[in-house]
Amino acid sequence: MTTSSLSSPRAAVPAPAPVPAPFPWVGLIALAATVFLSVSSEMIPTGLLPEMSMSLGVTPSQVGLLVTFFAFTVVVSSAPLTAATVTLPRHTLMVAILLTLGLSNLLTALSPTYELVVASRVLGGLAHGLFWALVPAYAAHLVPQEQIARAVSITLGGGTLAFVLGVPLGTVLGQSIGWRWAFAAIAIAFGLGALAVLRWLPKVQRATHSARTDAEPRRDPTVLPVIAICVTTAIVMIGHYALYTFIAPFVTDSIGIAPEYLSAALFIYGGAGAVGLILTGTVFARRTSLGLIAALATTAVAVTVMALSTSTLWLSGLALIVWGLAFGLIAPLLQTRMLQTASPRIRDTASAFYTTAFNAGIGGGALVGSLLLDWQGVSILPVADVALTLLGLVIIVATIRLSRRRKNSPESTPA
């Protein structure tokens, strides 16, 4: 009797609410730093074409092919390498990838011939493809579902910063003391990045280890939506890079911006893209569908206005800035939507296919742009960009509507 009366009040005390885990700022910033280094490493040859061609005894176009070899290696190897490393610990794999990227840049710096430089870039492409398959999924594993957009925007911020600061700084360094020292500096930075990841990036558990022992369907139901997103990514990136690869002649010849102000114009474009990235993690963090539709539509409108108003410098310049801002939203929102769509057990594989689609878009866009440039001149490139962007918009809208229809169907409603 006494025991009962004493114990009942204690039993009535509710259990304390679980304390939400703090947002992993330090880990995400460490990932963003590695993204900064990876993008800088990929694009640095574009700023050092004259120096590398003279030193290696090849033409500038052959040096430009180093980026193509790099991207093609990513396209071919990303998915197979992701499948081959699926059972490895993510944290250890990340450190190994960074060290391999550092080794690749060191070998580039030490290579005496063009052929060895190509081989070192292929090694870098192998690691780069696996890196991009791992990083977005890693960021998504660190946070709950509703914070994925914020985490991805922080992580991908390193890539935006690479275009705004990393590549220009590497170019200045290479022009000042030699292109080999620029690659050596990037190699050292990758070593420091590996140490930072080892120290500050939290380890994550993959959900795929128990996938085959569960009562889950053999075929993951999120595969088809992920494929649709990857196809859309490839289409939109082909359109974008068909124009952006030749943005210099378009800005100087069509818009009429003086060549000495080209770097300033591209810096402003990149800065507008950084604003778009911030909007991804704030305004559209929980409205990815709305943000993606708005960004694709705005890109199509901005590029159209830019192409039609080349005789009015202020209007075409303003359209260029709006284009940069809108495109700054597209890549992270596509990545976020893919991660939100994919089930946890296929996120790494989905990221690999997304990386393949993105790099296929880069290489394909440059090829399409060069063919169109030889055929009709620079004025046709915005038309290709707008057409493919609108096609991507149609696919995204259709995918969103189909997804909502499935969620509201009687079969998906629990009894």
Image (tube, grey):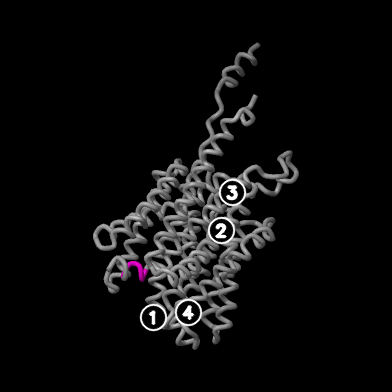
SS state under label 1: helix
| Between 371 and 182, the one nearer to me in the picture | 371
Residue 338 lies, with reference to residue 61, above or below; the image says: above
Residue that carries the numbered disc 2 in the rendered image: 357
| Cα gap from disc 3 to disc 1, whole angstroms | 43 Å
| Between 258 and 330, the one nearer to me in the picture | 258
Residue found farthest to the front: 376
Q: Closer to the observer: label 4 or label 3?
A: 4
| Cα gap from disc 4 to disc 2, whole angstroms | 24 Å
The amino acid on which the numbered mark 2 sits, given as a three-letter code, is: Ala
- Residue located 57% across and 52% down the image: 137
The reply to whether callout 1 and callout 4 are in contact (CB within 8 Å) is no
Q: Main secondary structure of the magenta part?
A: helix
Residue that carries the numbered disc 4 in the rendered image: 61
Residue that carries the numbered disc 3 in the rendered image: 226
- Say which label, 4 or 3, has the lower sequence index: 4
Q: Position of residue 28 (x, y in %)?
A: 49, 54
- Residue located 41% across and 75% down the image: 47
Q: Which region of the structure is painted magenta?
A: 248-252
The amino acid on which the numbered mark 4 sits, given as a three-letter code, is: Ser
Quarter of the image where the C terminus is located: top right
| Cα gap from disc 3 to disc 2, whole angstroms | 11 Å
- Say which label, 3 or 1, has the lower sequence index: 1
- Say which label, 4 or 2, has the lower sequence index: 4
Residue 36 lies, with reference to residue 300, above or below; the image says: below
Residue that carries the numbered disc 1 in the rendered image: 175
Q: Closer to the observer: label 2 or label 1?
A: 2
The reply to whether callout 4 and callout 2 are in contact (CB within 8 Å) is no
The amino acid on which the numbered mark 3 sits, given as a three-letter code, is: Val
SS state under label 3: helix
Q: Is residue 364 left or right of residue 88?
A: left
- Say which label, 3 or 2, has the lower sequence index: 3
